[in-house]
């Protein structure tokens, strides 16, 4: 199924994935990751995008963000993409494309799936057998959300803040949340949603989005539409 036209309402969180072309390496070392995060910080502030969670893997990026202005996500990602490709090509003396076309994204129902996306994103290095504990991986938002390390790029979502009345309580509850692996069914739902540009949420959430944007955020029903026939009395 072809991906749907991008829908990006202000105030609705999005799960964003940007992969290297043909899954090629797009971060050759820690300095590359630092450069990418510097631009993420710069352009998220410039275009008014709240960044809640992130992880940089060897050949792709996951972000969980909320746009506060119309078109903010696309402008942010285009700016980061252009700057990083220029840097990467200069650094590694190469030319041509780096990214797999446009980034992929899906809208996320906050109260039902937002913390699941936090968990999915920050447990990526664990699922990839790169580390045993997400705290061992430096290039994710785990240090912010689970350990309380501050960075100007990070904006906690209200769902995260609801984990506790104090900072210490939130950090404790968040670490407990990430002790639970993401289920196979949820992994499938998250991956299908972002790969196809579908909304991740309940039926009511999806219906509200389609009414708000006048665009489809759910898959078409399988099968060909039935031809109209004359009724027989």
Image (tube, rainbow, N blue to C red):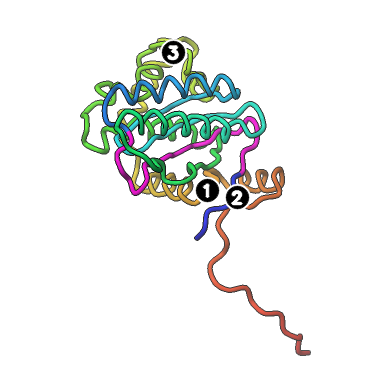
SS at badge 3: loop
Give whichever of 74, 95 is nearer the camera.
95
Residue 130 shown left or right of residue 147 in the figure: left
At horizontal 67% and vertical 32% (from top left) the residue drawn is 70
Q: CA distance from mark 1 to mark 3?
A: 30 Å
Mark 1 or mark 2, whichever is nearer to me? 2
Q: Quick check: is 172 in the magenta stretch?
A: no
How many residues crowd mark 2 within 10 Å: few (<14), some (14–19), many (20+)? few
At x 72%, y 84%, the residue is 229
Mark 1 and mark 2 residues within 8 Å of each other at the beta carbon? yes
> Where, by quadrant of the figure, is residue 123 drawn?
top left
Earlier sequence position, callout 2 versus callout 3: 2
Q: Circle 1 sits in a helix, a strand or a loop, which is it?
A: loop
Residue that numbered label 2 is attached to: 5
| Coordinates of residue 126 in the picture (x, y in percent) | 26, 33
> Which x, y percent locates residue 132?
21, 29
The residue that mark 3 highlights is: 151
Q: Is 182 situated above or below 178?
A: below
Residue projecting furthest to the right: 233
Q: Specify the quadrant of the image occupied by residue 173.
A: top left
Q: Gap between marks 2 and 3, in whole Å?
A: 33 Å
Looking at the rendered structure, the number of numbered marks drawn on it comes to 3
Q: Identify the magenta region.
A: 7-26
20 over 118 or under it: above or below: below
- Residue carrying label 1: 197
């Amino acid at each position: 199924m072809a991906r749907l036209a991008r829908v990006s309402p202000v105030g609705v969180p999005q799960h964003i994935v940007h992969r290297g072309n043909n899954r090629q390496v797009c971060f050759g070392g820690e300095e590359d990751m630092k450069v990418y995060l510097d631009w993420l910080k710069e352009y998220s502030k410039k275009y008014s995008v709240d960044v809640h969670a992130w992880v940089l893997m060897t050949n792709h990026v996951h972000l969980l963000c909320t746009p506060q202005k119309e078109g903010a996500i696309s402008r942010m990602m285009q700016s980061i993409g252009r700057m990083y490709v220029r840097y990467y090509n200069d650094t590694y003396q190469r030319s041509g494309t780096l990214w797999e076309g446009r980034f992929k994204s899906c809208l996320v129902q906050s109260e039902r799936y937002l913390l699941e996306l936090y968990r999915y994103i920050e447990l990526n290095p664990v699922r990839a057998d790169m580390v045993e504990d997400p705290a061992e991986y430096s290039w994710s938002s785990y240090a912010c959300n689970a350990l309380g390390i501050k960075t100007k790029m990070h904006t906690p979502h209200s769902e995260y803040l609801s984990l506790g009345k104090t900072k210490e309580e939130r950090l404790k509850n968040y670490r407990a949340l990430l002790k639970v692996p993401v289920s196979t069914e949820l992994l499938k739902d998250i991956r299908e949603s972002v790969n196809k540009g579908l909304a991740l949420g309940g039926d009511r959430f999806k219906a509200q989005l389609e009414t708000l944007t006048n665009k489809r955020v759910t898959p078409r029903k399988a099968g060909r539409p039935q031809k109209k026939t004359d009724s027989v009395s």
